[in-house]
Image: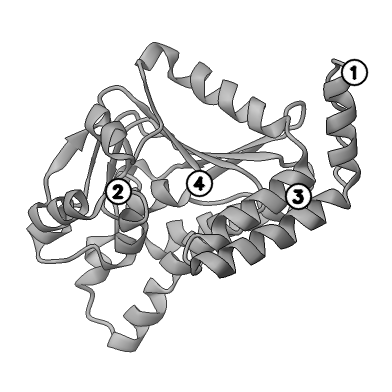
Amino acid sequence: MPYETVRYELAAETGVASIALDHPETRNALSDEVLDDLLAAFTAARDDDAVRCVVLTSTHEKVFSSGGNLSGFAAEVPLIHKHFATERFPKLFQLIGELGKPSICAANGHVLAGGLGLALACDLVIAREGATFGTPEINVGVFPFMIMALIYRNVGRKKTNEMLLLGERIDAEEAQRIGIVNRVVPAEEFEEAVQAWAVKLAGKSPVLMRLGKDAMYRQQDLPFVQALELLHHNLTLAFSTEDIQEGVAAFFEDRRPEWKGR
């Protein structure tokens, strides 16, 4: 289906779906309209069995996303309307976490404020050299409430405190050092690097990927014993699949596995 503020494309030959933020006049500010389109696009990717991996990126030459829509923050509308509007953020972060398919954020430009939360909701982040990352909300009298939980789950506490309280940007190399980014790639190699990881992820067993992704998302905040119980449960489910049998057989027969997805 067409979207007003994002581009959605599926490469049928690889199973890689691309969701590109496409609202350049606002530097991809996360307005209600953009968030609605992202929710719809990720839902479409989740529900399409042909999609094996999702890449989130931007059509803007310099900016991935400038973050939340500040004009919406200051709009003269009833407070309850603002509350309901901002529910889109946790819904989107949860949707990406429970996607059942691997996701890559291809940060081809500056990743700021709410855009940083969007990037961190993805499983992997590849940054183009020159991209910057930051939570500048405090500088305009706001605070990054909706993305705070994601940052603390990816970055050490003191460094997160520094980012939230000072509101300064960091470069891609520093973002990689502190755990926001997996790889930093020169501009001329960026698209190839993203595509290589996406195709590799799309080539894995879809049923084992779904079980693994579910375990990754659900265990992260459980007490240790409960996390082990969940992981034990998912391992037993994995034993029941045809793909685990095929994967082991292919390993011993020194061939590529042919996944059935069941």
- Spot the residue most to the top: 188
Of mark 4 and mark 1, the one earlier in the sequence is 4
Q: Which residue is denoted by mark 3 in the rendering?
A: 48
Mark 3 vs mark 2, CA separation in Å: 32 Å
In the picture, measured across the screen, residue 38 lies left or right of residue 252, that is left
Pair 2/1: label in front: 1
In the picture, measured across the screen, residue 5 lies left or right of residue 15, that is left
Query: Which label was assigned to residue 168?
Result: none
Mark 2 vs mark 1, CA separation in Å: 42 Å
Between 234 and 47, the residue placed more toward the observer is 234
Between 137 and 243, the residue placed more toward the observer is 243
Q: Which residue is denoted by mark 4 in the rendering?
A: 6
Q: Does residue 242 show up? A: yes
Q: Residue at x 28, y 86 (%)?
A: 79
Mark 4 vs mark 1, CA separation in Å: 44 Å
Q: Which residue is denoted by mark 1 in the rendering?
A: 253
Give, as a three-letter code, the residue at label 1. Answer: Glu
Mark 1 vs mark 3, CA separation in Å: 32 Å
| Percent of width and height locating residue 39 | 55, 60
Q: In this view, does 194 lie above or below 79?
A: above
What count of labels does the image hold? 4
Q: Does residue 1 show up? A: no
Of mark 2 and mark 1, the one earlier in the sequence is 2
